[in-house]
Amino acid sequence: MSLAYDVIPVTIVTGFLGSGKSTLLADVLHGAAARDTAVLVNEFGEVGLDHLLLGAIDAQTVLLDNGCVCCAIRSDLKEALASLFSRRARGELPPFSRVVLETTGLATPAPIIATLLADPLVAHHYVLNATVTVVDAVQAGYQRVRHPEWLAQVTAADRIVISKADLADAATLEPLRAQLQQLNPAAQIVLRSAADDATCLFAAAQAAPDLGAIASRAGNAARRFEAEQARMQSHPQADPQARVAHAAPLAVPAPVDANHLANIESFCIEFDQPIEWPVFTLWFTLLLNRHGDNILRVKGLLAIAGTPQPVVVHAVHHLVHPVLHLDDWPDANRTARLVFITCGVARAAVAASWQRFCRHLQPAESVH
Amino acid sequence: MCGMCGLLGGGRHWSNTVAPGADANARRQRLVQVAHANRVLAPFRLRLDDFHGQSFVLSSPTGASEMAGDLMQVWQAAEKMLGRPLDPLTLFADEAGAHDTVQQAH
């Protein structure tokens, strides 16, 4: 009898309506590389899997020719994940080793991540592998301005796949890539191509984030985006969205919430001394409790007093992923850092708040 | 409340993580957390106690008490008891300047 206890990695595939999530899934879910995968979708009809179908297990579940199972979510996600696991345990489904969850186009990923991290039943059997967001290169400008879900999907991503890049020209793609990098410097950004295989879905989010690169990307993207904005303001006719006539994008409306977008900033806070973990947990829970709505993402590596092992901290809004202790620092740079992506929460205020907490809660001699 | 209350608390919460090899065990770290939290809550006349290493009990001077599974719930309960937000960006702001423990970088 095997006593193996499986914790199944879940990859969330999100993206706005029509961005190409289902196409991406249908393209990469064939062949041996994608076998042993269970796919949770909202509707079978939305995913063009007919050519991959081997047979139906029941009204909600179909088997693909490479051994993947595809299940429709009947009611809520928690029930779907729990049912999937119990049917696997009973042998009613093939023993899949990973799950891909396709969200609806209007979903914000935070509640889904909350279910995975915090639900007492689901959290013991599943672990979040990565969040992949598909961004429509042609419609991104419109969706960015009109739909707050688009922003939530982009900022929650570990990996951003730009789809329909063949319909957009370089003058559209470069500013889009710069803006995506500015909005989420922690994400890896790739262009969708016909050669994409399952690794574009299943590659794990980096356990040890390259914070130097992330901080650098945040700065570079911000500068490029500002330069691009300045250029477009001085030459409105150079608006790249207006030139993609063949792709027939929707006209970009007046940015009614331009202030909201302008308030989004990425910044990095460095800690030059190991932190006291109990103090950090108090400060960080207080911060996320009060400002979690406006803290879109936090990712970082911390040095903890009393242990040589660095800790990876990763948060989306109010949710903090299980912290990960690394055996060693990923590179020679041992500076502890947290990268924040916020909306209206200023770097200076966060840094000063941490300083005050340290001073108030730690013995004076340890705050240096 | 009976002795079983709170046993199904937030023991799995990320803030309860203890690094392997660290010189603090989970229970000791939790007591340090509670002591620190009480230094934050004392000006508001609230008090926090550990409950079985799984939950917290937040008490007010008027006798109100509420169970919280993890630190996030503690702050939510405290805000509810106080009737106003506990904002870390302004807490202790009236104190003298701090040391340069944090540097800002882009």
Image (cartoon, coloured by chain):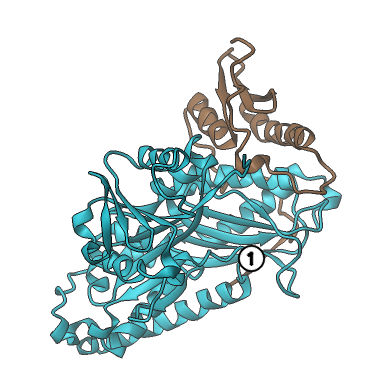
Chain colours: A cyan, B brown
Q: Position of residue A249 (x, y in %)?
A: 16, 76
Secondary structure of residue under mark 1? loop
Q: Say which quarter of the image contains residue B15.
A: top right
Quadrant holding the N terminus of chain A: top right
Can you identify the residue that label 1 sits on? Answer: A208
Q: Position of residue A313 (x, y in %)?
A: 61, 55
Instruction: Work out which residue is located at the far top of the displayed protein and give it.
Output: B2
Position of residue B47 in the picture relative to residue A51 (left or right): right
Position of residue A334 in the picture relative to residue A151 (left or right): right
Q: Say which quarter of the image contains residue A196.
A: bottom left
Quadrant holding the C terminus of chain A: bottom right
Name the residue: 39% across, 42% down.
A92
**Along the line of sight, which residue is nearer the eye, A302 or A223?**
A302
Q: Position of residue A179 (x, y in %)?
A: 38, 75
Q: Position of residue A119 (x, y in %)?
A: 47, 37
For residue B90, say whether it is visible.
Answer: no
Amino acid on which disc 1 is placed: Ala
Vertical arrangement, residue B36 with respect to residue A343, above or below: above
Name the residue: 28% across, 59% down.
A54
